[in-house]
Amino acid sequence: MDAFKGTAVRLVFFAFLTRYALSQEYFRMGVNTNTAEASQFLREYDREASGMCYRVTMSQWKFVTNITEYNRRRMLEELALSSKFERLSWRKAAAYDSSRLSDPQGRRQLMKIVQASRAALPDDKYSEIQQLISEMKEIYNSAKICPYGQKPYDPHIPRIPYSNEYQDMNQGYQLANQPYQHYQPYTESTESTYCDMQLDPEISRILAHSRIESELLYVWKSFRDQTGPKLRNRFMRYVTLANQAAVATGYRDAGDQMRAAYEDPSFRASVEEMYNQIQPLYKQLFTYVRRKLVQRYGVTSVRSDGPIPAHLLGNMWAQNWKSIMDLVMPFPQSPNVDVTAEMLRQGFTPLRMFQMAEEFYTSMGLKPVPPEFWRGSMLVRPAQRSVQCTASAWDLCNRIDYRIKQCTEVTMQDLVSTHHEMAHIQYYLQYSEQPQLFRDGANPAFHEAVANAATLSVYNLPHLQRVGLYQNKSHDPYEVGMNFLMTMALEKVAYLPFAFMVDQWRWSIFEDGVQNMNSRWWQMKLRYQGVTPPVARHEGDFDPGSKYHIISDQEYIKYFLATILEFQIFEQLCSVSGHTGHLYECDVYRSRDAGRVLSEIMQAGSSKPASEIIKSMTRGKTNRISPEALVRYFRPLELWLRVQNRDEPLIGWSSNYHDVALFAPQRGSSQALTTSCLFIALSLICTVL
Ligand SMILES: *[C@@H]1O[C@H](CO)[C@@H](O)[C@H](O)[C@H]1NC(C)=O
Ligand SMILES: *[C@@H]1O[C@H](CO)[C@@H](O)[C@H](O)[C@H]1NC(C)=O
Ligand SMILES: *[C@@H]1O[C@H](CO)[C@@H](O)[C@H](O)[C@H]1NC(C)=O
Ligand SMILES: [Zn+2]
């Protein structure tokens, strides 16, 4: 073990010297340059890894579609085996000097085995970090709060319409490759409960539907009380271990290691630039929404040129604002598109919805799903057993068996979700001929981006008219269009600053250490999202711990990129299909040309860098992810918002001393005092700029 560590240190040094010369391949490398041996290893790896993947994924499938103690134990056993296999393979792969291998695909495969793993840690620390992560998930998942004002929870508050796209609690398609996480049986609450309210569904429903400020504040704060403080110490230890693993693999820190998957040496600058490009649109939306909140809650609650208190936006993390559509609808006299009633009238069934989704893709010349799909999938909630209902698409790693698990109900939300999950299945089918290591999106953002690009074409009026679900009922098309764009903006545009700041914060913790974690979190929330905590926060509160992806070790920047990339892909599809006019009215149904572009993106899997795939997708115009398409999509709404905001004193927000004092580092020693003053001064400058 000691010799092993010694080598690691030298390798890190070597990696530093050569990182720019070798571009992305700056992780740890061994000395074996025997190409024949390496190819032999990769052939064996491909076979064994596919087999291992099948067993693990099948055991996960059995568990989430039939939650029993027995199935849970079986799954944990398989996961333990798979973790052992990962460590073993990592050691073998890390023995090769991949930079010397002549075969570029082999080089890339070795890189993928070594790059993202923590297997460089010694055994005890490797187990420790896994144990920590699973304890943190456990604590998070068991967080419960008491009902507000001791009144029992009312199960008749309407159920939140289920949206798969940003219900990123448990991103479905990834289950196949990821160990046990957040499997929580979905149980409809039918009786009053006491101190038994969970994030999903009770707390989320209150945040979405209650308009009583004190109740919102109560659930916002109580959920944080039940998570952050219990997670903080474990999280700090996790940061130490994750950094050690990264350094032993050849990276500067764990954030550096997470970013490597994007194969872009100027990645941080690129995402920052993207944020800056969407900021003017965000500020217009923000300003309009703030005025509506001032009208609803009064200036004592929301300052008319200030940031927005984070508990008033309909969501625990202020990341998705669609639940407050009732407060901000542009034309309340015109409808918001919802074809649920029409689907019911036409006697839709879950099966028909899936057939319709399949036909959407085959109409573009893409692949039908195999018979195994219809045999194996779980399309409705079964009556006799407990299941986990989050919609997800599964690749069982044997090139035949693909499945969807969704407790489908006949609603428009679920119709959209059906098309979304079917897009993941299409992705699996398209890259099925790639080796196991390349059966994935071109970078971590691609799977979601492609699935959402397809659904942008489904969830729009022209498409719903084409499939006979929407009749023109002589409503003003402009008003209906603005209502539609506002719904989309509350979901996508409002989400971007949040999706951006989560990993900005995480990277800064990995890079600069764990002091003042909570005030840095709020400083970034204020700077990028324009939100403040509704009550004073302290270091011990550890508010980042209220976000599942932080404590469950899942990177987040992919959601920021996916949201931007989905519009970029969508615009390309629309352009080759010959669409003219507003982007938000484009439908690529039945376009073989759009199908060809999609299959080209998907077939490559992750065998090529994302930049190459974007380059061929855009016919050489660019090799980067760019928010221009997203901004164009929302242009008609942005113009409308500018008119609404013309009398506003400030587009965006300015923060004052009181805003910043809510989360400034605590005074304790004179040093802390100095830091805190400096911190306040800096925040003011930053946010005023
Ligand atoms: C659910 O799992 C149990 C094992 O715990 C098994 O006996 C049972 O047959 C399974 N039910 C179904 C419907 O697959
Ligand atoms: C719907 O009807 C209105 C008036 O009857 C008309 O102005 C509008 O163009 C129609 N919209 C579509 C999409 O057909
Ligand atoms: C994208 O293309 C530019 C030149 O057009 C090149 O300098 C850059 O390295 C490319 N980026 C990536 C990530 O390949
Ligand atoms: Zn998805």
Image (spheres, helix red, strand yellow):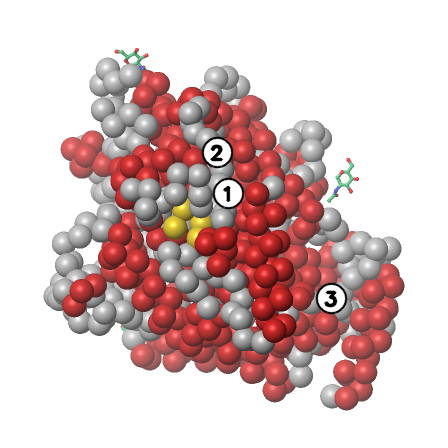
628 left or right of 253 in image = left
Q: Which amino acid does label 1 sit on?
A: Ser
Q: Name the residue under label 2.
A: 650
Visible in this render: residue 295?
Answer: yes
Instruction: Residue at 54% x, 75% y: name it.
Output: 668
Residue 78 location in percent, x, y? Answer: 47, 76
The C terminus is located in which quarter? Answer: top right
Find residue 155 and report its horizontal and vertical position in percent: 15, 58
The numbered mark, 3 or 1, whose residue comes first in the sequence reads: 3
Does the closest atom of ligand 4 sit within 8 Å of the Cβ of label 2? no
Q: Identify the residue at horizontal 33%, vertical 60% (top origin).
A: 220
Residue that carries the numbered disc 1 in the rendered image: 654
Q: Spatial distance from mark 3 to mark 1, Cα to Cα?
A: 35 Å
Please tell me in which quadrant of the rendered image residue 21 appears: bottom right
**Residue 284 image point, x, y percent:** 47, 32
Query: How far apart are the alpha carbons under marks 2 and 3?
Result: 41 Å
Label 1 – label 2 distance at C-alpha: 8 Å
Q: Can residue 176 be seen in this view?
A: no
User: Identity of the amino acid at label 3?
Assistant: Arg
Residue 252 image label: 3
